[in-house]
Image: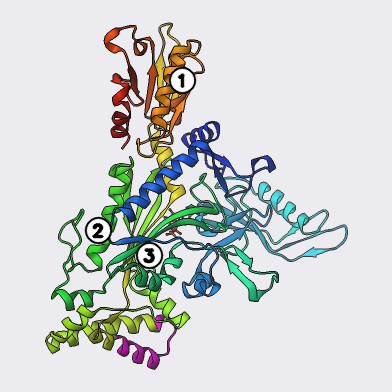
Amino acid sequence: MAEPKVNELMEKIVSLCKRRGFVYPSSEIYGGINGFWDYGPLGAELKRNVKELWWNRMTRMREDVVGLEATIIMHPRIWRASGHVDTFSDPMADCLLTRKRFRADQIEPQSGTAYHYTGAMDPASGKVSEEPYAVLLPPGKPPESARKLAIQFYQSRGLGPVELQGERPEKVEHSQRFNPDNGSLLTEPRPFNLMFKTYVGPVADEDNVAYLRPETAQAIFVQFKNVLETSRQKVPFGIAQMGKAFRNEVTPRNFTFRSREFEQMELEFFIKPDEVVEALCGRVAKPEAAGHPGEPRPDWGWQLWHQYWVEERIRFYESIGLPRTSLEEYWQKPEELAHYARATVDLLYKFPFGTQELEGIAARSDFDLSQHERVSGKAQGVFDEELRTAWGKLAPEVQQRLSESYFQHRRKYLLRAGAAEAEAEKEAREDAAGLAKGQYIPHVIEPSAGVDRLILALLAHAFTEVTSTDDKGRSETRVVMRFHPSVAPMKVGVFPLLKNKPELVAKAREVFEVLRGSMLAFYDDAGAIGRRYARQDEAGTPYCVTVDFDTLGETPELKDTVTVRRRDDGSQQRVPIGALRAHLLEAIR
Ligand code: ATP
C-alpha cells in the first residue's frame, strides 16, 4: 500500500525541464499551484512550433479546413446543450482521516482485511460517536494498526480518549473504497463537475454564472452557421481551433499530462450523413483495408472519413518525430462509446508512466449540431441544391429506404434528448422529409488533441542519456534531447571557436545575423567548445555552427566555410557561409 515508486525517468525529465527552462511549476515562489504549469523560454518555443505545425497542416495546407478563434467564456447555455453542466463530472472520494481527495475510479484496487467499527465512546466524558469507520490492512497485518488509525479518526471527531466499538473483520478483494496510502475508509464517491465556474458582471449570483470552457470544440459548433455562410465552404469541410481549456481535475498528476489549465487543438470535420452520400453517389464506399484510404472521395461515408482522420493524425505525429511504433490505437468498445458516438479511436502514447491518451478521434454523428439546434431554437442544418436535384431522380423505393433510415436515426436522437414519443416521431418525420428539399444536419468527425500532452510526449521521446569516456578514463553521462528539427526550440547554435579573438567573434556574429532572420539561432561564446555543444544538445538544438581559424583563411581552401555539427551523431561537415542558410533550412524542415 506504499506510495508507488515514482518513475525515475519522469523525475529526470521533470528536473531537466526545470533546469533548462522547458517547464516550471506555476507560481513557484508562492509554493506552486497544483495542476498549473508554465512554459519557460525553451518550452515556449517548443510549444509554439508544435502549434504552428498543427495549424499549418490542419488548415493552411488544406482547402477544406478553415480556422476559428473564439472566446474562452461563452454563453452558459452552450454547456447545457453540450451536456457538460449535467454530466461532465468525475467521481470524487475523500480520505475520512486526512481529507486527501481521490478520483474514485482511478484508485488502485486493494485486497486485505477491512476492520469495521460501529462507533466509539470517550470513557472520560461519556461522549459517543456512532459514525461507522473502517481501515483496510494488507493480508497478515495485525489489527493493532487498524485500531490506531480508528482511534485517530474518532479523536478527530471530538472524542478525547477512545474506546472503539463493534470491531468486525471482513475479507476484501479489489476494493476502491480505501485510501491506498494509509488504509483509511473514504467517503462515498460523489460526482464532481469539472468546469470552473465564474460570474460575468458585477453581481455574483446564479443568474450570472459562466464557465471557463472545458474544451474548444463547442465554440466551433455554435459558430458553424456563421463560418459556413462566410467562408464559402461546402460540406464536407472542417473548422479548426486551438486554445486554452480548463478542467478542475480532481487529481492533477503525471506532470503536465493532467493539468487544470491546458491547451487543445481540435478539428470538427463536418460530413454528409450516409443517406445523403448514397442519394448523391448511388453508394457509400466502405473501408477496404487498414491504413490511409487516400485522397477523399465524394462517396465516402462516416467510416472512411473517420479512418482517414485517424491516419492523417498518425502521419502528423510521425512528421514531428513520434514514430507509429511509439503510438497505440485504442478503438473504444461499443459499451465504452458515448451514446451518440459511432466510433472513437484514442491515440495513445507510451509515456514513461504508462500508455495513455494523446488524442481522441471520434465519429460523433450529428449530435452536437442537433443539440445546439434544439436548445438555441436556431436551425443548424444545411441546404444542398445537388441533393435536392439528385433526390428527385431516385427510384421511389430508394427514397423510401434512405428516408426511413434517416428518420430512425433522428427519432433515436430526439428520444434520447428528452423529446416525448409523439414529438420525436413528428420531428423526425419532418427531418426525413427535408432530404427531398436538400436539407440535412451534418455529421462530424472530431480529432481532438492536447498540446501539453503532446509536448510531454515529445520531451519524453527526445530524452536520451549519453555516456562518454575521456582519454583519462573519466566517464560522464549527459542528456541529449533528440527532438525532430521541426519542433526543436532552437534550430542552430553559432559559436566562435575562441571568445578572445576579435576576428573570430566578428565573423561568428556575422554568421549569426545571416541565420537569425530565418530560424531561431543562439549565439554562444562562453566556455570550451565541447561544453557549448553539450549545452545545445541538452536544449535539443539539432545543429551547431563553429567559426574557426580556417573560416578566416588559415587553410586557404577553407576560407569562408564553417563547421556544421549534427546533434544526433556528432558528425561535422564544412559548409561555405554563402550556402549555410539554405543548407540549414533544408536540414531543419
Ligand atoms: P482523459 O480521459 O485523459 O481525461 P478525455 O478523454 O477527457 O481525457 P477529451 O475530452 O477527449 O479528453 O479531450 C481531448 C484531449 O485534450 C485529450 O486527448 C488530451 O490530449 C487533452 N486533455 C484533456 N484533459 C486534459 C488535461 N486535464 N490536461 C491536459 N490535457 C488534457
Q: CA distance from mark 2 to mark 1?
A: 44 Å
Amino acid carrying mark 1 in the image: Arg
Vertical placement of 492 versus 143: above or below? above
Amino acid carrying mark 2 in the image: Tyr
Q: Quadrant of the C terminus?
A: top left
Residue 353, how many percent across, how many down?
45, 43
Disc nearest the viewer among 2 and 3? 2
Which residue is denoted by mark 1 in the rendering?
532
Residue 503, how many percent across, how many down?
44, 12
Vertical placement of 546 versus 25: above or below? above
Q: CA distance from mark 2 to mark 3?
A: 22 Å
Counting other residues with Cα less than 10 Å from the Cα at mark 1, is it few (<14), some (14-19), or many (20 or more)?
Answer: some
Total labels drawn:
3
Is 586 left or right of 369, judged from the image as shown? left
Return the disc, 2 or 3, that comes first in the chain's sequence.
Answer: 2
Residue 506 falls in which quadrant of the image? top left
Residues under numbered marks 1 and 3 in contact, where contact means CB atoms less than 8 Å apart? no
Q: Extreme right residue here? A: 125
Q: Quadrant of the N terminus?
A: top right
Q: Which residues are magenta?
A: 415-431
Query: Residue at the spot x=39%, y=32% of the render?
Result: 491
Q: Magenta segment: does it hold 418? A: yes
User: Is residue 530 visible to the viewer in this orientation of the structure?
Assistant: no
Disc nearest the viewer among 1 and 3? 1
Amino acid carrying mark 3 in the image: Glu
Residue 537, how many percent across, how many down?
42, 26
Instruction: Tell me the number on the disc at residue 336.
Output: 3
Q: CA distance from mark 1 to mark 3?
A: 51 Å
Instruction: Tell me the number on the disc at residue 274.
Output: none
Residue 289, how many percent across, how many down?
16, 57
Return the disc, 2 or 1, that comes first in the chain's sequence.
Answer: 2
